[in-house]
Image (spheres, rainbow, N blue to C red):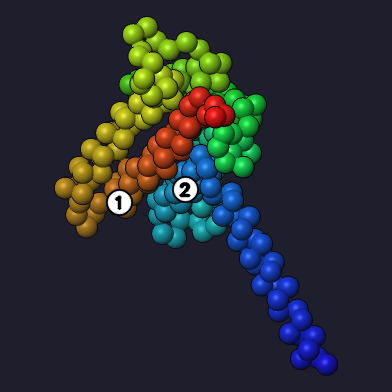
């Protein structure tokens, strides 16, 4: 009897595991999933690298917690970056809900995702500008925000933008990532070329992490172009 009871419970656990797997897979699909995988990976690696920089024997868990806290809210720029990341997570959630049934997305939720992402980009602008990264602040911050707000409010394309070209404001968002990708690529190449036994792991892992994040974010950007295509007319 006990063996029969066990046999009856095994499928239920398998079904639960399969159900969980399906829910996780659904979470990772679409632009919202790509955005938030990149957000989570970047945030997690940033905290891990900050904690890794604590000297051995420097206080254990308390020192690690202090390092993580410093990374998140250690100064106004760090606090702004953390706040911007939180807004980007919310934006990713809006995109996830909008695209839950595939294309075309729910226009209201997709617009909320664009608006939230634009707000997050403005916060990112403040953080980068305060750190002295003016070029990245203008591109990854202001240009990104302009592209997201233009997509949300359906602004007219820039003068001279041809009708057959890809969506103007979605293209702006994609273009806003190029300077940061180039900067991270140069940092990674420089770190690899000059690496020796004394080189800290963060010297090459930080730009590599950023490149992985940007690959995911660019993939999500490209997915969102589908939201700008005119709906197919019935025959």
User: Is residue 39 found left or right of 160 in the rendered image?
Assistant: right
2 left or right of 26 in image:
right
| Image disc number at residue 200 | 1
Residue 187: x and y in percent read 25, 39
Q: Say whether disc 1 or disc 2 marks the residue closer to the N-terminus.
A: 2
- In the image shown, does 17 or 229 lie closer to the viewer? 229
SS label for mark 1: loop
Hey, which residue is sitting farthest right in the picture? 1
The structure residue drawn at horizontal position 56% and vertical position 16%, both measured from the top left corner, is: 153
Work out whether 13 lies above or below 39.
Answer: below
Q: Nearer the viewer, residue 75 or 88?
A: 88
The mark found on residue 95 in the picture is none
Residue displayed at 45% across by 30% down? 225
The percent position of residue 121, horizontal first and vertical second, equals 49, 25
Q: Residue 45: x, y in percent?
A: 44, 49
Residue 17 position within the rendered picture, expressed as x and y whole percent measured from the top left: 65, 67
Given contact means CB atoms under 8 Å apart, are the residues at marks 1 and 2 in contact?
no
Query: Residue at 20% across / 42% down in the picture?
Result: 190
* Crowdedness near tag 2: few (<14), some (14–19) or many (≥20) residues, C-alpha within 10 Å: some
- Nearest to the observer: residue 33 or residue 140: 33
Instruction: Count numbered badges in the picture.
Output: 2
User: Does residue 72 show up?
Assistant: no
Number of residues whose C-alpha sits closer than 10 Å to that of mark 1, classed few (under 14), some (14–19) or many (20 or more)? some
Q: Quadrant of residue 221?
A: top left
Give left or right: position of 5 versus 213. Answer: right
Q: Quadrant of residue 213?
A: top left
Residue furthest top in the image: 159
Residue at numbered disc 2: 41
Q: CA gap, disc 1 to disc 2?
A: 20 Å
Does 71 sit above or below residue 56? Answer: above
Q: Secondary structure at mark 2?
A: helix
């Amino acid at each position: 009897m006990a063996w029969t009871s066990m046999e009856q419970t095994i499928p239920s656990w398998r079904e639960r595991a399969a159900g969980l797997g399906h829910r996780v897979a659904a979470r990772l699909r679409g632009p919202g999933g790509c955005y938030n995988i990149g957000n989570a990976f970047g945030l997690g690696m940033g905290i891990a690298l900050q904690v890794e920089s604590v000297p051995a024997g420097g206080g254990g868990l308390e020192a690690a917690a202090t390092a993580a806290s410093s990374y998140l809210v250690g100064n106004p720029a760090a606090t702004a970056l953390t706040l911007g990341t939180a807004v980007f997570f919310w934006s990713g959630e809006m995109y996830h809900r909008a695209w839950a049934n595939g294309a075309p997305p729910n226009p209201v939720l997709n617009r909320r995702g664009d608006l939230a992402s634009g707000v997050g980009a403005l916060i990112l602008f403040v953080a980068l500008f305060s750190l002295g990264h003016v070029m990245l602040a203008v591109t990854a911050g202001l240009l990104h925000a302009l592209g997201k707000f233009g997509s949300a409010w359906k602004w007219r394309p820039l003068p001279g933008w041809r009708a057959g070209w890809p969506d103007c404001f979605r293209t702006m968002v994609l273009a806003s990532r190029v300077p940061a990708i180039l900067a991270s690529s140069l940092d990674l190449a420089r770190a690899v070329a000059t690496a020796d036994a004394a080189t800290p792991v963060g010297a090459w892992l930080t730009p590599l992490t950023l490149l992985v994040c940007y690959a995911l974010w660019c993939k999500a950007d490209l997915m969102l172009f589908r939201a700008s295509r005119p709906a197919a007319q019935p025959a």
